[in-house]
């Protein structure tokens, strides 16, 4: 596989305000890449820089080997784009918007466009200002997919969609991926990322703090371990055990709550040494894994992948 | 300023208050300042001359500064300010409604009645503040002209003008309860133009005086506070105020009871519409020629406003050919080579048919066509501000091509307007037997196009850098300054290089002398440079997400 998206130290500042800082990552052709981060982290700035809407302050971004800032028209031939929030001439109907953008873009498969309209149950006769948020999003999705782009860049694609249409969207992404398209999507919805993405990048405060496969991220997760003892317990027993990140004593003094990273072997041995009567582990949700990255704790080092 | 809807709305109006108040005030002041220079002609001749132009304003004691100013500007002042009040009235509720912002405002514990009342109060306050600024300029003008500074007269003149303009704002507000913002503004503007024509015609043609009673501007014209010795008639002003309150008051219950985000007319139009399969709709729109490119789409979008502007410009031209025909001999006898007439009409000898038409029609059309193109081009700025170009620019069309295609819309509209004016003049002249040279009329009409292009280019060059409201203010200032320099150059004795900067001076009098190709080339080059700047800065800078991303 070759990289279809490639950024190198991509930086965008708005005057003195941070946008994104030193983003270096690649997205391989044919893969589905999720871009996660809290509000204001820099997801949309990254996407709009990839689209050539923003001029990088430093570094570079390329799509299909084309520079995003200096060759935007060529880049746009490759992609289908759905903005996070978009507005359009309010007097145009959905059908007119789709026809108009289709004419500007060229190469639209009209039958396919119609099938998308029908799949999302979009009423194309209504004017843009009459559409609900979800229906506006459907117009955006139809125009993004209708020309069979090699690369789909989707900013919060299921925002405003009802669960049925979200499922339809996941099926659509699976279909286009099956046909070889690459999907780059930003999202807050972790289930969506698990459904649709093979790899995830996490951005916080403008910096990329993690890029990895979804399953690897889950492997890196921490465990919450609760150990119950017959008599009074002491947190000091576990403080020096490898992998234990934190330990606290329950109010009644018989249970210890441990945060552990990695394997649990050493913890189990130590618990047995102190006659533990019970040991339970809880696997944190993927959401908690992400929240750990999102948290405005001491900045994690930027990563290069 | 964010404590109440009233103060927030007033904050939104702050640039308009300053721009319109200072701009209109300056124009009034300029009339006072130039009055002394026009007194060279005998008062009797002046009075006779202006009576022929009563269409524009009341001709009473025009041999005095107050009478002259009343005739020259106070008659049209409510209509000029009415352009803003009609736009603001249409936007009062429907603007935020169409952008979706009103839902949030109405979700706060404020009743709809309170919301519209506060917004109305803000509009009325803004008009009052504009009027006060104009009154200050009138006082300055009185002092400059050496007449008694009469604060009461200045305030009455400015506030009654503001009230007449507010009437059209209230009308637009009422219309906006049943139609879209653009349709309401357009309809209110059309009715205002009709009111002006009825009042002017009734005033100028005594056998048609009854027409004046159909126009609300008749109530405004009952008072001429700047004319020395003129009595103040309170009743017409009270009636005008009552009518304004009535229109605004009628809008309140409609706004309170109707669905937010829907228009009654649109509902009516779609009531009997049969559901059509999506495939048919998609196929039909694919065949639509108007969605096949950025330029065509822009033309389609502005077709309504373009149509009405062109109709109005053509009617204006045709009407004055008829007026010219009916009073041709009187004018030639009266004026000859009158220095006063030359001064008033920018040095044009109006003692000939062509000179008369040039002064009466093209003297104003040049400003109107430039304004028309500037307003159309400002849509580009509005789209940039709102972030409506994000999807269009995400297509393979290069940014520069998108901009040029959009620029083609006002350019084409200006060409259409020039063609319509030519046709209206030639046809009306032919029908009424008024001899004109079609070639010269064509030159004068075609000469309007570079003025439109340079104004549109100025707007495009500033778009995306500063907000649309500020661009409109700069454009209005540029046109007003350019026009005043051209019109008053003889009276003000301005240096040649200053006069040369005026685009309207560069336009000249092509109906008399043909097109000055050097000036035309200069204007076109300037327009191309400004357009190039606009294209460069649009291609080179970050594309703002606009209000879509806010």
Image (spheres, rainbow, N blue to C red):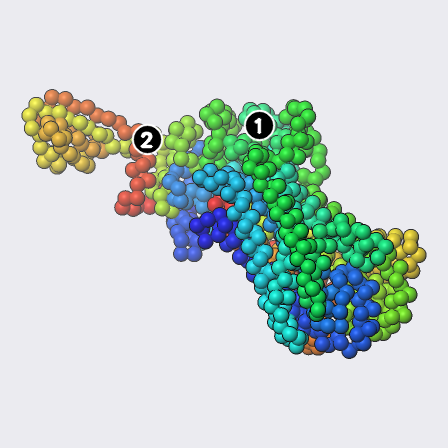
**Element at label 1:** loop
Q: Residue at x 52, y 53 (%)?
A: B10
Q: What residue is pinned by disc 2?
A: A286
Judged left or right of residue A211, residue B316 is right
Q: Position of residue B16 (x, y in %)?
A: 57, 57
| Chain under callout 2 | A
In 3D space, how far apart are the residues under numbered discs 2 and 1 (Cα atoms)? Answer: 33 Å
Q: Nearer the viewer, residue B290 or B492?
A: B492
For the residue pair A150 and B50, the one nearer the viewer reads as B50
- Residue drawn at the location 14% of the way across and 22% of the way down: A278
In the rendered image, residue B407, in percent from the top left (x then y), is placed at 66, 51
Count neighbours of disc 2 (C-alpha within 10 A) and say few if under 14, some if 14 to 19, many if 20 or more: some
Q: Which residue is mark 1?
A: A122
Asked if residue B291 can be seen in this view, the reply is yes
Front residue (pair B356, B257): B257
Residue B443 position by quadrant: bottom right
Q: Residue at x 91, y 55 (%)?
A: B432
In the drawing, does residue B25 fall left or right of residue A197?
Answer: right
Q: Residue at x 81, y 51 (%)?
A: B210
Give the mark nearest the N terminus, 2 or 1: 1
Q: Which quarter of the picture shows residue A1?
A: top left
């Amino acid at each position: 596989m070759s990289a279809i998206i490639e950024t190198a130290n991509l930086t965008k500042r708005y005057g003195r305000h941070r946008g994104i800082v030193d983003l270096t990552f690649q997205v391989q052709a044919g893969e589905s890449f999720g871009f996660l981060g809290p509000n204001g982290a820099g997801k949309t700035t990254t996407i709009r820089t990839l689209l050539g809407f923003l001029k990088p302050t430093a570094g570079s971004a390329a799509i299909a080997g084309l520079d995003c800032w200096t060759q935007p028209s060529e880049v746009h031939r490759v992609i289908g784009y759905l903005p996070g929030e978009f507005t359009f001439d309010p007097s145009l109907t959905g059908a007119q918007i789709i026809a108009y953008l289709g004419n500007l873009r060229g190469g639209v498969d009209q039958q396919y466009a119609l099938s998308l309209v029908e799949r999302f149950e979009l009423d194309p006769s209504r004017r843009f200002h009459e559409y609900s948020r979800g229906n506006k999003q459907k117009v955006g999705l139809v125009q993004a997919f209708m020309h069979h782009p090699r690369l789909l860049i989707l900013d919060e694609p299921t925002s405003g969609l009802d669960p049925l249409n979200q499922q339809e969207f996941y099926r659509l992404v699976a279909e286009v991926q099956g046909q070889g398209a690459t999907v780059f999507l930003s999202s807050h919805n972790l289930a969506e990322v698990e459904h649709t993405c093979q790899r995830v990048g996490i951005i916080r405060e403008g910096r990329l703090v993690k890029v990895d496969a979804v399953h690897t991220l889950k492997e890196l997760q921490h465990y919450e371990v609760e150990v119950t003892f017959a008599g009074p317990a002491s947190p000091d027993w576990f403080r020096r055990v490898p992998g234990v990140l934190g330990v606290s004593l329950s109010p009644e003094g018989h249970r210890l709550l441990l945060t552990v990273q990695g394997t649990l072997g050493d913890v189990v041995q130590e618990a047995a040494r102190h006659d533990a009567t019970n040991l339970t582990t809880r696997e944190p949700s993927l959401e908690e894994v992400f929240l750990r990255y999102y948290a405005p704790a001491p900045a994690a080092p930027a990563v290069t992948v | 300023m964010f404590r109440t809807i009233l103060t927030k709305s007033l904050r939104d109006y702050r640039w308009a208050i300053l721009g319109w108040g200072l701009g209109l005030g300056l124009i009034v002041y300029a009339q006072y300042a130039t009055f002394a220079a026009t007194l060279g002609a005998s008062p009797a001749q002046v009075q006779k001359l202006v009576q022929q132009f009563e269409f524009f304003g009341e001709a009473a004691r025009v041999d005095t500064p107050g009478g002259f100013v009343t005739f020259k500007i106070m008659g049209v002042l409510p209509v000029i300010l009415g352009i803003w009040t009609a736009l603001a009235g249409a936007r009062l509720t429907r603007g935020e409604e169409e952008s979706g912002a009103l839902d949030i405002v109405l979700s706060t514990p404020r009743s709809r009645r309170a919301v519209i009342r506060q917004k109305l109060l803000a509009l009325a306050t803004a008009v009052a503040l504009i009027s006060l600024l104009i009154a200050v300029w009138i006082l300055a003008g009185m002092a400059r002209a050496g007449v008694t500074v009469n604060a009461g007269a200045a305030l009455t003149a400015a506030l009654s003008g503001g009230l007449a303009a507010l009437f059209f704002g209230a009308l637009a507000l009422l219309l906006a309860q049943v139609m879209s913002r653009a349709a309401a503004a357009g309809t209110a503007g059309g009715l205002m133009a009709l009111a002006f024509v009825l009042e002017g015609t009734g005033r100028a043609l005594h056998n048609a005086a009854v027409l004046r009673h159909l126009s609300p501007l008749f109530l405004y014209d009952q008072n001429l506070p700047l004319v020395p010795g003129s009595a103040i008639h309170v009743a017409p002003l009270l009636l005008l105020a009552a009518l304004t309150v009535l229109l605004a008051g009628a809008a309140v219950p409609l706004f309170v009871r109707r669905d937010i985000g829907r228009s009654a007319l649109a509902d009516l139009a779609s009531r009997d519409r049969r559901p059509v399969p999506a495939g048919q709709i998609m196929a039909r729109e694919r065949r639509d020629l108007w969605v096949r490119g950025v330029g065509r789409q822009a033309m389609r979008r502005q077709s309504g406003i373009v149509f009405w502007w062109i109709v109005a410009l053509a009617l204006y031209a045709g009407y004055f050919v008829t007026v010219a025909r009916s009073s041709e001999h009187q004018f030639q006898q009266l004026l000859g080579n009158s220095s006063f007439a030359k001064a008033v009409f920018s040095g044009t000898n109006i003692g000939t048919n062509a000179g008369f038409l040039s002064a009466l029609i093209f003297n104003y059309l040049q400003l109107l066509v430039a304004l028309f193109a500037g307003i159309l081009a400002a849509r580009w700025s509005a789209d940039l501000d709102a972030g409506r170009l994000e999807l269009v620019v995400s297509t393979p069309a290069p940014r520069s091509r998108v901009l040029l295609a959009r620029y083609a819309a006002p350019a084409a509209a200006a060409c259409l307007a020039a063609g319509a004016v030519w046709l209206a003049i030639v046809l009306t002249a032919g029908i009424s037997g008024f001899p004109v040279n079609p070639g010269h009329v064509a030159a004068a009409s075609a000469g309007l196009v570079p003025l439109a292009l340079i104004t549109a280019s100025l707007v495009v060059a500033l778009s995306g850098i500063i907000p649309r409201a500020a661009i409109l203010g700069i454009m209005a200032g540029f046109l007003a300054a350019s026009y005043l320099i051209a019109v008053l150059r003889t009276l003000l004795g301005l240096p040649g290089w200053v006069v040369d900067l005026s685009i309207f001076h560069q336009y000249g009098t092509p109906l008399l002398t043909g097109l000055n190709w050097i000036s035309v080339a200069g204007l076109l080059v300037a327009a191309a440079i400004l357009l190039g700047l606009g294209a460069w800065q649009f291609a080179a800078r970050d594309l703002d997400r606009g209000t879509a991303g806010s």
